[in-house]
Image (spheres, rainbow, N blue to C red):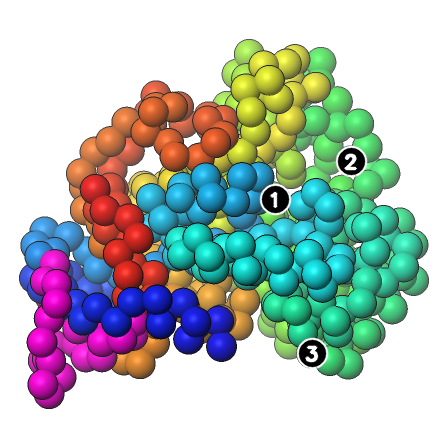
Amino acid sequence: MRDELNSEVSSTDIHIRNGRLIDPKNGLDSSADLFIVNGRIAAIGKAPESFSAMRTIDASGRIVCPGLVDLSTRLGSLETELAAAIAGGVTAVACPPDTKPPLDEPGLVERLIRRSEALGLARVFPIGALTQQLAGEKLAEMTSLSKAGCIAFSQAQHPIFDTQVLLRAMQYAATFDYAIRLQPQDHYLARDGVAHDGEVASRLGLAGIPVCAETVAISTALHLARATGVRLHLARLSSAAGVALVRAAKLNGLKVSCDIDIHHLHLSDVDIGYFDSHARFDPPLRSGSDRDALRAAAAEGLAVLCSDHTPVDEDGKQLPFAEALPGATGLELLLPLTLKWAEQEKLPLLTALARITCDPAAILGIDSGSLSVGSPADLCIFDPVEPWRVTPAALRSQGKNTPFMGYEMAGRVHLTLVGGRVVFEC
């Protein structure tokens, strides 16, 4: 229903010509024209009968792919961050429940959806709170939240100390086939830590977070998922050991998926440098060998990629490393950092783009991430080699916090379409 509402905003028929179409879901990588009618993809290659374009877009030298789908986007200022999303070619975002107030009531969810649809930018898919106020004690009203529009349930970065509460949540979710998303980190093992527990943290005198903080939490979640049969998604894996646990679980038939923050594919704990607060993440940047394992997991399709977009104002970063707020702005860097990873790993674009289009769409269970005829015309048109420099002025997000500030990136988005409407153009 929400797709129908968004696509009805405009009935412009569009002809996109001379582009290189890449659609990982359907294995398409070829030069062909694409035709949009009433907000949906009507045909590829040959125009549909009686088609008359109200606009023709010349995509010569550019790639036309499904709009990017991001599994974790924090929306401090809704309009500003959704503007950043479409500038990065992201047409669908999943919003974690740790908003203010948390998404634990249907009215809050419905208001978020109404506001996002009124803006007409990227589509927003709320993740509901697993427990009331994310306190980890009483289960939230998952059925009511689902009816209001939540597509999964999570604690975001808030722990559940009582394992029985988590078990009951999984049992309830499994009964109604709701998906649960957990960021695996044992609170007690990670308590007071701010960096990977390794040589760099020791040298800088920073409190460390050991890898076992992740693996203990993953093991607990997998055991409970096996007992309940729930659909489980593990968010923001950071270690080789964590990847190995998920790989074994999938081989044993568990319904488990996972994602990796795009920053963790390119950075390691040495990038903290001399207390660079822009390199503070939760979970932390880990060792080079962990980073390499994450890159391999994404390449093989074990994990998908996300921006983990966390806009932080300057005051939140201009603090000593241990006191600075973790996270980075990521929506506008998701595509170029994915392209950089693909180039370094010598991966075909078909494979790389799958990790930020059809794969996350499948995890969310939404009708996005493909160029299938009949699907919503959510598209990203970009030049894969055009350079641009990451500067505060170049970022639309309210947060300018990124360890890549000043870097030159390859891959510039030129147009973004949502429901057949051009919502971004440069």
Q: Residue at x 58, y 14 (%)?
A: 318
Mark 2 and mark 3: Cα distance apart in space: 31 Å
Residue 383 counted in the magenta span:
no
Q: Position of residue 195 (x, y in %)?
A: 66, 27
Mark 1 and mark 3: Cα distance apart in space: 29 Å
Circle 2 is placed at which residue position? 190
Q: Residue at x 80, y 50 (%)?
A: 134
Q: Position of residue 290 (x, y in %)?
A: 56, 40
**Residue 130 higher or lower than 156, as above or below:** below
Q: Earlier in the sequence, mark 1 or mark 3?
A: 3
Residue span colored magenta: 30-57
Numbered disc 1: secondary structure:
loop
Residues tagged 2 and 1 counted as in contact (Cβ below 8 A): no
Q: Residue at x 34, y 76 (%)?
A: 375
Q: Amino acid at mark 1?
A: Ser
Q: Earlier in the sequence, mark 2 or mark 1?
A: 2
> From this viewpoint, which residue is outermost toward the bottom?
49
Q: Earlier in the sequence, mark 2 or mark 3?
A: 3
